[in-house]
Amino acid sequence: MENTTVRLAVRPEGEINDRTFVIASEPVPSLSEGDIRVALEYCSVDPAMRTWLSEITSYVPPMAIGELMRSGGIGEIVETKSADFQVGDKVMGRFGIQSVYSGSTLDVIKLESTNIDIRHYLGGLGGTGLAAYFGLLDVGALKNGETVVVSAAAGAVGHIVVQIARLKGCKVIGIAGGAEKCSRVIEEYGADACIDYKSEPLAERMKNLCPDGIDVYFDNVGGETLEAALDNIALGARIVICGAIGEYDNLDSVNGPRNYLNLIGKAARMQGYVNFHFAEHYETARADLIKWNQEGKLQFRDQTEQGIENFPAILKMLFAGKNNGKLLLKI
């Protein structure tokens, strides 16, 4: 059996290019006692991948040259030397971008048979759904009736944030790129309005749409969008820093918010987070997300692109704003 792998070849300077990764066929190793072999079906494609390719240490160490591209994945066990897993089990784990995983069962989760599409365990019930849940409800400390603004509102995390804020009884303003995405944010996800950052003045539109200020700003973008929100925060506002996709190609000279001093007069706070800070609450969060989905209050949108050989081009889609919802790679 052969395994197709995607490994880091050269650290990109700026945008990812054709030299960034090497895609190769490798023999699969033999299994040790306790190991499993998984034929991967789907891999997660995420903005954070770009940060892992740089030499800057964030919440995880940078990737080494030659290292397998990190990613969460879902697949089916085709061989096992573990008493805890059987051939045919559907599993989720940090398998990396490859066609076949062979190794330890550490942090591998068996997916029980349900009426939930397994792809959602990489999206709405995976890292992006959890990021929306914990960022909005725990870090953002959301209260009923507040005004919430969400950047990248049509994206993997953003579209779930919009829907949770709505079902919690809040006024929700999205920010997205282009008329099509803005329409989706309003018509499908339930936002009260959506600002098209490609054609509208951000700060001015925020002021018009949020006359009493922004109580919770959920940021997935950074840069000028974050600055525009800071110019319009309400007293006691919470700014949730989930990501900064607009800055990931420029990590050596990130554009920080020049107006962060607005936090002082507004007694506001700005806080970042990653999901594992809330690891002990994953089960509760997933139970809520599943409940809301089954009640018809929350939808999970994903976009699936085919072919491991197309991974570099698929990853670049995120930074060109070409994804709708959660982006997945089908092996």
Image (cartoon, grey):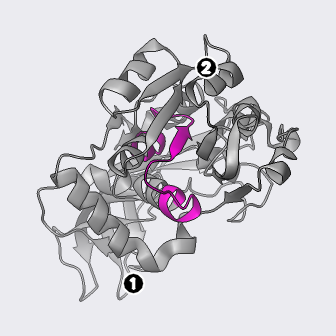
Give the residue at x 44% y 62%: 95
Q: Secondary structure at mark 2?
A: loop
Coordinates of residue 183 in the picture (x, y in percent): 38, 19
x and y, in percent, of residue 101 in the image? 39, 63
* Magenta-highlighted residues: 135-161
- Apparent side of residue 12 relative to residue 21 in the rendered image (left or right): right
Residue drawn 51% across and 73% down? 278
Q: CA distance from mark 1 to mark 2?
A: 53 Å
Name the outermost residue toward the top.
199
- Label 1: which secondary element: loop
The verdict on residue 143 being magenta is: yes
Q: Earlier in the sequence, mark 1 or mark 2?
A: 1
Q: Is residue 117 left or right of residue 81?
A: left
Is any part of residue 285 visible from this angle?
A: yes
Q: Quadrant of the N terminus?
A: bottom left
Amino acid type of the residue tagged 1 in the rendering: Ser
Residue drawn at (38%, 49%), measured in percent from left and top?
164
Residue 32: mark: 1
Q: Position of residue 117 (x, y in %)?
A: 20, 51
Quadrant where the C terminus sits is top left
Label 1: few (<14), some (14–19) or many (≥20) C-alpha neighbours in 10 Å: few
Question: What residue sits right under mark 2 in the picture?
Answer: 197
Q: Nearer the viewer, residue 94 or 266?
A: 266
User: Foreground: 77 or 239?
Assistant: 239
Closer to the camera, 309 or 212? 212
